[in-house]
Image (tube, helix red, strand yellow):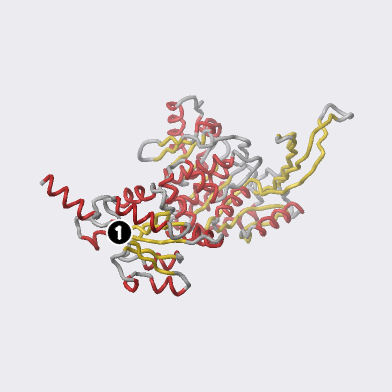
Amino acid sequence: MDRKTVESLFSRIGDIRCLVIGDLMLDEYLWGKAERISPEAPVQVVDVQREELRLGGAGNVVNNLAALGAQVAVCSAVGDDDNGTALLSVFGQRHVAVEAVFRDPDRRTSRKTRVVAAHQQIVRIDRESREPLAPAIEDRICAWIAANAGSFSVILLSDYHKGVLTQRVIASAIDAARASGIPVLVDPKGADFARYRGVTILTPNRKEAEVASGVAIRDQESLERAAEAIMAAAGLEHLLVTRSEEGMSLFSRTGAAVHIPTVAREVFDVSGAGDTVLASLAVGMAAGLGMTEAARLANIAAGIAVAKLGTSTVSPEEIVNAVALTHSDSDAKIKNPDALAAIIAAEKGRGKRIVFTNGCFDLLHAGHVKYLQKARGLGDLLVLGLNSDASVRRLKGEKRPLIAEEERAHLLAALNCIDYVVLFDEDTPLALITQLKPDILVKGGDYTPDAVVGKEVVEAYGGRVELVAFVDGKSSTNIIERVLERYS
């Protein structure tokens, strides 16, 4: 997985509509200091300094999806009590659709209170309902799912065994998803994974996989036996087993297992990490990533989440930066147009002058490098628009390019004088120039100003065109002719 792919995903994530069905709860955190022992009993006295309410259970999945930038709706049941009102208020602050959160006066809204001191949980207090949904509420949830599921890109079931995901509710979600051709992802609980039969993928942790399969997972062989048992019992297309410090393992009905090593550099708190995995896996699948790439995205997100205290979300920026750390500088410089437009807008806001030039740069040579160095000297950042392979063929003939677009992009991005490389597929960079709005447009000295594509666009908002001479005698054509002459 590279940075360009991840940036492209997040540039269109606002179009992804996610439906989360599951057990909602409030996570209350009391942060304080513990510096003395109570005279009443041998326990610590916590002096509370700060209080915080977070979305817990399926709400943390919702929170993660919203933090990633997706559109989210939630379907569940809560009590007609103060905690239920507070929970719906938090959803409202995050612009989450809650029309399918039904209130039951006979149900208690779950609330878990964690007392934290010196970066450690001292105690947790649970107040919750565990009984299955009342039949009337179950009927309303199933009816809503059947009527509305088809308007979503993906459905996520977040099961905390608190009574919302009854067998009827699960079946309603699976049937509605199948009818609409959308994936269903489940973070499961309990020993009976057969209750999720027909979903696209389950995401149990190692302990959950052991319980469900009856296989003690000690090595890769036992892991594969456990996965085989689970997939057979639940009729799965895919299974993603999260294995803490050992990373994740993806199993599919066809193809070999994929074992993904952890990327976590520090583990502070694993609570809520499974919710992060489910959310990031879902947006990856909904955005069109292959299952393996979506799992790698989830692995990166989980590595960020466990470095935070408490149930925390992960931002697109954190994921993009984490991906960049695993790749070379050249990879980090190669952008898609939408991501680059946002970067340029921010840099211009900081007063930076953006220089843009473009070309095929097939067989990079010293003349190219000198030209690019001169262009870079005209401003603060140099953006290179690079013709794609298809574009080069149309311009220079079917035998070109000699170097494929990905190789050309990496070679150019490795140059210190280039800040960003962006590929374009058109014959000219006019659309790219219009989108990026550079301050200075540079072309070779063999052009006249009026012949430079994009001149009118740039000058219309106060930019300018600069012509930079190429080094005489240096060209890709000359190199090709010398090779043919010497080796023919």
Q: Position of residue 470 (x, y in %)?
A: 30, 59
Q: Is residue 79 above or below residue 459?
A: above
Q: Position of residue 130 (x, y in %)?
A: 68, 43
> Which corner quadrant of the image does residue 42 belong to?
top right
Give the side of residue 321 with respect to residue 392, left or right: right
Instruction: Please give left or right for residue 101 compared with residue 221 in the image.
Output: right
Q: Amino acid at mark 1?
A: Phe
Q: How many marks?
A: 1
Closer to the camera in the image, 412 or 60: 412
Quarter-wise, where is residue 85 in the image? bottom right
Q: In the displayed orientation, state which residue is furthest to the left.
A: 488
Q: Disc 1 designates what residue?
A: 470
One can see residue 164 in this view:
no
Report the front residue among 402 and 309: 402
For the residue pair 67 and 84, the one nearer the viewer reads as 67
Residue under the point 58% across and 42% down: 305
The percent coordinates of residue 437 (x first, y second) are: 45, 66
Q: Residues within 10 Å of mark 1 (few under 14, many from 20)?
A: many
Q: Name which residue lies at 59% across and 44% down.
A: 159
Q: Nearer the viewer, residue 135 or 435?
A: 435
Residue 385, compared with residue 402, is above or below; it is below
Percent coordinates x, y for residue 318 in the rendering: 55, 47
Kindly state the secondary structure of the residue where label 1 is placed: loop
